[in-house]
Amino acid sequence: MQLVLKSCTIRPWRLDDAESLAKHANNRKVWLGLRDLFPHPYTSDDAHKFLQKAMDAEPVTNFCIEVEGPATGVIDIYLGQDVHRHTATLGYWLGEDFWGRGIMTEAAAAFTDFCFENFPLRRISAEVFANNPASARVLEKAGFVFEGCLKNNVIKDGKLLDSLLYAKTK
Ligand SMILES: CC(C)(COP(=O)(O)OP(=O)(O)OC[C@H]1O[C@@H](n2cnc3c(N)ncnc32)[C@H](O)[C@@H]1OP(=O)(O)O)[C@@H](O)C(=O)NCCC(=O)NCCS
């Protein structure tokens, strides 16, 4: 799989992505938008463990975003199970140096199309912390529909936050 887009390329991970991945991931501003499962600080060891897991997964659901060279971000889909087996959840982050150029909007739109074509999905959703308007805007621009505000749904960085649910259906 390789999606060559105007602003970036989405491709499978390689072991030599570790250094660049750790460099961009080790950023509190990136961590603030993500689940606590995402380490902070983010070490080279974290990057190696992540890469091994992503590369061993079957099917592969986690991909590298490359902008002008080495790995600069992540986009992935978490496939639902049981009665939710036709659904998936989208996740993503990008190195701060590359924010504000429309990269994630293009990546999210193209990757969602790819996932609908390659997995038996009827719904792809994403949940954004309410204090993350950039990510909400990405989803809106990528064609996701706002479905509702989940009150007091998240505790991040010691703050109780609402989260915003977006989805695309087929
Ligand atoms: C969220 C994130 C992926 C956005 O990536 P990006 O490539 O910069 O996004 P884009 O450039 O495609 O679009 C960002 C949009 O948000 C808007 N935006 C940015 N900051 C904003 C703010 N504080 N308030 C309102 N809108 C804002 C931008 O203006 C742009 O919209 P526009 O094109 O209408 O002007 C990136 O900031 C990131 O990785 N953050 C940390 C991790 C994270 O939050 N991941 C998402 C978890 S749900």
Image (spheres, grey):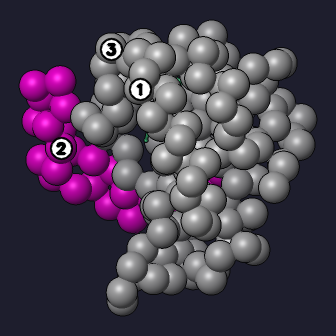
Q: Name the dominant secondary structure of the magenta segment.
A: strand
Is residue 126 toward the left or the right of residue 12 in the image?
left
Residue in the foreground of this view, choosing between 75 and 135: 75
- Residue 166 image-quadrant placement: bottom left
Residue identified by numbered label 1: 46
Instruction: Tell me the residue that label 2 is attached to.
Output: 154
**Residue 144 magenta-highlighted:** yes
Whether label 2 lies within 8 Å of ligand 1 gets the answer: no
Quadrant assignment for the N terminus: bottom right
Rendered residue at 81%/37% (across/down): 9
Neighbours of disc 2 within 10 Å: few (<14), some (14-19), many (20+): some
Which of these two is toward me, 100 or 73?
A: 73
Query: Is label 1 in contact with label 2 (beta carbons under 8 Å)?
Result: no
Q: Quadrant of the C terminus?
A: bottom right
The question of residue 69 being in magenta is answered with no
Is residue 140 in sight in this rendering? Answer: no
Which stretch did the figure color magenta?
139-167
